Amino acid sequence: MKNSTPLKKRVFCGVFVLSASLQAFSYKIDVLAESFSKVGFNNNKIDIVRGIYPTETFVTAVGQGNIYADFLSKGLKNQGHTLEGKVGGTVGGVAYDSTKFNQGGSVIYNYIGYWDGYLGGRTALIDGTSIHECTLGPDGKMIDSIACGNAKANKIRRNYLMNNAFLEYRYKDIFVAKGGRYQSSAPYMSAYTQGFEISTKVKDKNEGNHKLWWFSSWGRAFAYGQWIYDFYSPRTVTKNGRTLNYGIHLANYTYESKGIRDQC
């Protein structure tokens, strides 16, 4: 029983720390509903020989839900610290599809749900023997038809994804670190990214500002009213017969002083 008092103290301290953390924690829930419509005025019948294809008409219905969390107390915020996070996903579907009964089947998966695997090539691996749009040729191999390709793509489409799952830490306007899945602000890498970015800013003795920014991404996704694509690798390499994703990496240096701005 000699250790009973220290044990009680440790338990009390643990409860106190947990209580303090809960008091600093706050969250909010955001729900968004969106619909996109595209109307095509070219309603000619498909003529593959002449290269005539109608313009698709479709209507989407997309919903997104996010939980935003703020983890720090007011005291730490007053010192310039910020720690935030968000977790959320998107789900959608097609309310109207003018291509559903076209020769070759629906192609609206190109807008809502297209997913060929994270590293690509997944559609080609699907066994089409169970898909009635796919037929075998005299040689026993699957005939590579438009209808079969569309049917395979529709079979593995994903109308949902978790597009937000990140933490972001900021200290005043000096340092920012962000990682996870979030909406990208990087040039040529719009939509959602899967990776991290870090930036820091320092001021020299001549009041000039030096800012260094690093961005790394291992995936891209779209989660909007018109587009739903789950995360995929926008750039891959093949090494020793394997498809790999080394990521996309960007660096930027900016100098500002007395109205003059230079970056590289």
Image (cartoon, rainbow, N blue to C red):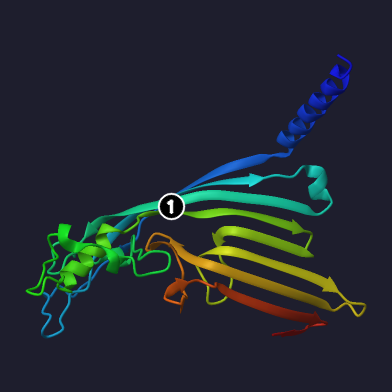
On the picture, is 113 further left or further right than 79?
left
- Taking depth in this image into account, of 162 and 111 the one nearest to the observer is 162
Residue occupying the far front of the picture: 240
Which residue, given by chain and number where applicable, does mark 1 sit on?
A: 90
Residue depicted at 78% across the width and 43% down the height: 74
Location of the N terminus by quadrant is top right
Residue 43 seen from this side:
yes
Label 1 element class: strand
Give the residue at the far top of this rendering. Answer: 1
Q: Is residue 56 above or below residue 79?
A: below
The extreme right residue here reads: 205
Please indicate whether residue 140 sits to the left or right of residue 97 in the image. Answer: left
User: In screen coordinates, is 218 left or right of 232?
Assistant: right
Q: Which residue is located at x 70 percent, y 73 percent?
A: 213
The residue depicted at 46 percent of the width and 64 percent of the height is 221
The answer to which image quadrant residue 10 occupies is: top right
Frontmost residue, 158 versus 42: 158
Looking at the picture, how far across and down is residue 18, in whole percent? 74, 32
Q: Can residue 33 be seen in this view?
A: no
Tell me the kind of residue under disc 1.
Answer: Thr
Count of numbered labels shown in the rendering: 1
